[in-house]
Amino acid sequence: MDTVPYIVYESSMARAERTIKRLWILALVIVFLLVASNIGWLIYESQFETITETMQEVWQEADSGGLVAICVCPAMPLRRTGRDTIR
């Protein structure tokens, strides 16, 4: 069995150390970019207004003179259409 010269061993170890160092730097950059993109996404999403759902009660006058609840349902949002009318 032939022995490997010391200089070959040292050069391969130095190359491996450089490669490992580059991989660690790449891993840290990826983690930093992941955290930065999550923070950016949270900042972007937080600028929009939170919409809360309200309930709307619909009442109708009964024959006996009292009021009867017909429906307790979520209020429908108003939307603008292309013709600038509100539906």
Image (spheres, grey):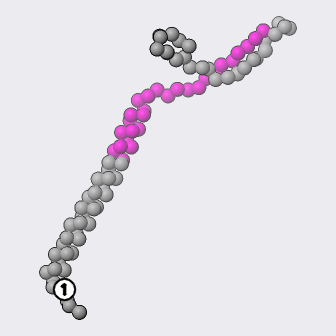
For the residue labelled by badge 1, is the local secondary structure a helix, a strand or a loop? loop
Residue lying farthest left?
7
Where residue 38 sits: x, y (%)? 39, 43
Which residue is nearer to you in this view: 6 or 54?
6
Image side of residue 66 versus residue 27, left or right = right
Query: Where does residue 75 sit, x and y in percent of width and height?
Result: 62, 20
Given residues 31 and 80, the one toward you in this image is: 80
Q: Residue furthest right?
A: 64
Q: Quadrant of the image for the C terminus?
A: top right
The image quadrant where one finds the N terminus is bottom left
Whether residue 39 sits left or right of residue 54 in the image: it is left
Residue 26 position (above or below residue 77): below
Q: Which residues are magenta?
A: 35-61
Left or right? Give the position of 80 relative to 14. right
Residue 48 appears left or right of 23: right
Please give the residue where the numbered disc 1 appears in the rendered image. 4
Toward which corner of the image does residue 48 lie, by quadrant? top left
What residue is rendered at 61% in x and 23% in y?
Answer: 54
Residue 13 sits inside the magenta stretch: no
Splitting the image into 4 quarters, where does residue 61 fall?
top right
Q: Could you say where residue 9 lies in the image, as x and y percent from the top left?
A: 19, 80
